[in-house]
Amino acid sequence: MSAPILKIENLQAKVADEDLQILRGVDLELNAGEIHAIMGPNGSGKSTLAKVLAGHPGYEVTGGTATFEGEDILEAEPDERSQAGIFLAFQYPVDIPGVSIANFLRTALQAHAGDEELDLFEFQDLLMEKMDLLDMDPSFAERPVNDGFSGGEKKRNEILQMACLQPKLALMDETDSGLDIDALQIVANGVNKLREDNPEMTVLLITHYQRLLNYIEPDFVHVIVQGRIVESGGPELALRLEDEGYATWQSEVTEEVG
């Protein structure tokens, strides 16, 4: 059996410059091509885990390890992690007025290419190919990044970035946040098409609700409570959470910590 693409052992992290521990020993393994969903109540550490893996400066790792393709990523800069093949889709994507999506993507791809000059015509062909795959109007690429976008358009832009950058590991931080059912279906269809186009892409979905998993079926579901993964299972675990909530796990973890 091949080694996991991402292996996390006893990962601990806190808010930078504060004595606020959030991750308290996360253990997790992801193999290439798998979809893992992490679910948990507010403040449980879901988004913190994604941000720590991406190298967000607002968090400080206080213990444990995280290896990507066998290499330690916790000491790498965010751009180095990106170039290695890790992509973070933000819960709240940032607006960049005055910068078109096409120029933004071209700059990102050039950064990944390093010293090799990115051919303009090859980039245009790639962009049009990915927009066609995602059923997007070509004019979308000329709009300023997220400026004046609806919630659904912002998330769709994140999916387009994933399509062009072709990450090995996509961290999706509450991509369903604030989306109505139509926008949710558009984003989910985009993710599913990307996985059909690139079956080896691994996805870590961070979500509150089971509804996203109606459209993107995970291979594994993990429950995180108070900074620890307390149970793992198949898609049926998400349905159980929908029925029972997190109260049982929260009380168990509170007693254990106490």
Image (cartoon, grey):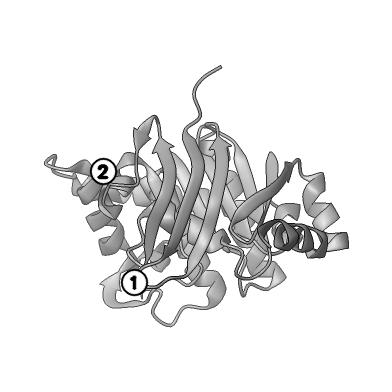
> Could you say which is closer to the camera, residue 194 or residue 177?
177
- Circle 1: element type: loop
Residue 229 horizontal/vertical position (percent): 64, 49
**Quadrant including the N terminus:** top right
Residue corresponding to mark 2: 122
Tell which residue pokes out farthest to the bottom in this image: 148
Q: Is residue 43 in view from this perspective? A: yes
Label placed on residue 17: 1
> Residue 166 sits in which quadrant?
top left
Tell which residue pokes out farthest to the top in this image: 1
Q: Residue at x 57, y 63 (%)?
A: 175
Q: Residue at x 62, y 65 (%)?
A: 176
> Could you say which is closer to the camera, residue 124 or residue 34?
34
Judge whether 6 appears above or below 14 on screen: above
- Circle 2: element type: helix
Residue 87 horizontal/vertical position (percent): 41, 51
Q: Is residue 137 in view from this perspective? A: no
Characterize the local packing of mark 1: few (<14), some (14-19) or many (20 or more) Cα atoms within 10 angstroms: few
Q: Amino acid at mark 1?
A: Asp
Tell which residue pokes out farthest to the front in this image: 258
Q: Amino acid at mark 2?
A: Glu
Given this view, does label 2 or label 1 mark the residue nearer the observer?
A: 1
User: Is residue 100 rendered to the left or right of residue 166?
Assistant: left
Label placed on residue 71: none
**Quadrant including the C terminus:** bottom right
Q: Residue at x 51, y 66 (%)?
A: 155
